[in-house]
Image: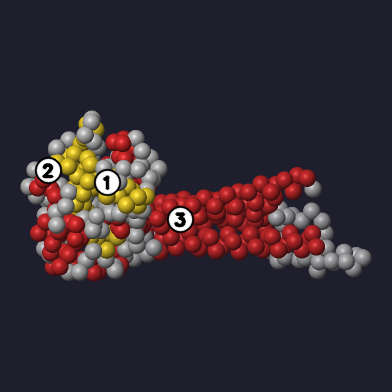
Amino acid sequence: MKRIFGRKWLVLLILVGAAGICLLSWLKMQSAVCDGVYALSSQRDDRIFTETDIANIEKEGIDLTYTQQVYPDVSNGFRREEIPVFLTNENYAFFTNTHMQEGAFFNGMQIDRKLALMVLNEAAAIQLFGNRECVGETVFLNEVPYQIIGIMAGREEEESGIYIPYSTKDLLGISSLEISQIWCRFPNLADAALVMKKVGYPIETLKLMQIDLIKGVFEQRFFSLLIIAGGYAVFLACRSVWKWKKCIPRIKAFRQDGNMDTKWISIIVLQVLGTCIGIVLLWKAVEIAWCVPPSYELLGGSWREIFYGMMDFYLLIGAGLDNMPLLPHWNLVSILSAAVYFYFFSLCIFARKPDREIKC
C-alpha cells in the first residue's frame, strides 16, 4: 500500500507540474505579442522599407510598427552612457503588449508635431538615473534635449533601450528611415499577400513570419509532450484490470459480503480517466504538430533559420501556406507521441496481468 500510494502521488505531481508549466508557457506566449501580427522583411539583404513604402501600406488601412536602431551619444547631463536608441511610431507599445510603469507612450499627434520626447525601459531608467522615477527628466541625444514622458514596465533579462518618435530623426542628423523589418496586422495570409502586392512587394519576395505562432509553437509542442507523459504516468500507475485475451475490463465491484469495493472501482475510474486524458492529449499534439503548421517561411538560408527549421521539422517553401497538403508535413512529434502512447497501452494490455481473480 505504501509503495502504491507513493507512486500515485509521484504520478499526480508529474501531471500537475506538467500542466502548470504548460499553462505558464501559454500565458507567456499570449502576452508576448498581440494576435495576427506578421513580420515582413525582404529576401534580399540590400532591400529595405522606406518611408514611402510604409506610407503606402498605411494607406491601405493596415496597422504597422517598426524600429530602426541607432547609436547617438546618450547623456543624462552628467555622464555618457552607451544605450541603443530605437526610432519607432505610436503603435509599438500596442504591437508588443508593452505596459507602462509610469507615464505614457508617445502618440500620433506628438509624432506629427515632431516633439523631442522619449520613453525608457526600466533597465535604461536605472542605468541613467539609478531609479525608475525619472518621468519629466531630460536626456541628451547628440546634445539634443529629449524629455522623458514614460517608463516601460520591466521584463526579465531586459537590455537598456530608449524609444523616440521617428519624426525626430532630423534632430539626430538621420536623413531617412531604413527599416529592414516591419510588423503588420493582417486578418490572414491572403490579405497580407494582396496588400503587399498593391504596394509593390510581391509576397514571394518577402520573408514572412507570424510572430505569435513563432513564439509559441515550440513551447506548445514541447509542453504538450510533458502533459502527455503525465497522462501516460497516470494510466500506468493504475492497476491493470484488462483481460489478457479479450482485452475487456471485467470489474469486481462487490465483495462476497455484498459491500461495494470502492477501492477497486476507484482504480478502474482512474484507469479510464487516464486513458481518456492520453487519447485527448495525443490528438491535440497531432493537431498542433501536423494539422496546424506555423505560418512562416524559412527561405533565407542562414544557419539560424536552418536550425529553426530543423527544430520544427518543417522547411516551408513558397507562400501557399493555406493549401499545403497534410501528409508531407507529418512530423516526428506526432510519430513519437503515437509510438509512446501505443507502446505503453500495449504494455498495460498484454504485459500486466491482474493480481487477483476478476469476476463479472
Q: Nearer the viewer, residue 223 or 289?
A: 223
Q: Nearer the viewer, residue 77 or 109?
A: 77
Labelled pair 1, 2 in contact (Cβ < 8 Å): no
Quadrant assignment, res 279 = bottom right
List the residue tagged with mark 3.
26
- Mark 2 or mark 3: whose residue is earlier in sequence: 3
Q: Amino acid at mark 1?
A: Gly
Q: Is residue 218 left or right of residue 90?
A: right
Residue 62 rendering spot, x and y as whole percentages: 21, 66
Residue 307 rendering spot, x and y as whole percentages: 32, 44
**Front label number (1 vs 2):** 1
Q: Is residue 345 left or right of residue 250?
A: left
Q: Is residue 209 left or right of residue 143?
A: right
Q: Amino acid at mark 2?
A: Leu
Extreme-right residue of the structure: 257
Labelled pair 2, 3 in contact (Cβ < 8 Å): no
List the residue tagged with mark 2.
172
- Residue beneath the point at 27% across and 63% down: 185
Q: Is residue 211 above or below residue 62?
A: above
List the residue tagged with mark 1.
136
Labelled pair 1, 3 in contact (Cβ < 8 Å): no
**Front label number (2 vs 3):** 2
Please rate how many residues cluster around mark 3, counting C-alpha atoms within 10 Å: few if below 14, some from 14 to 19, many from 20: some
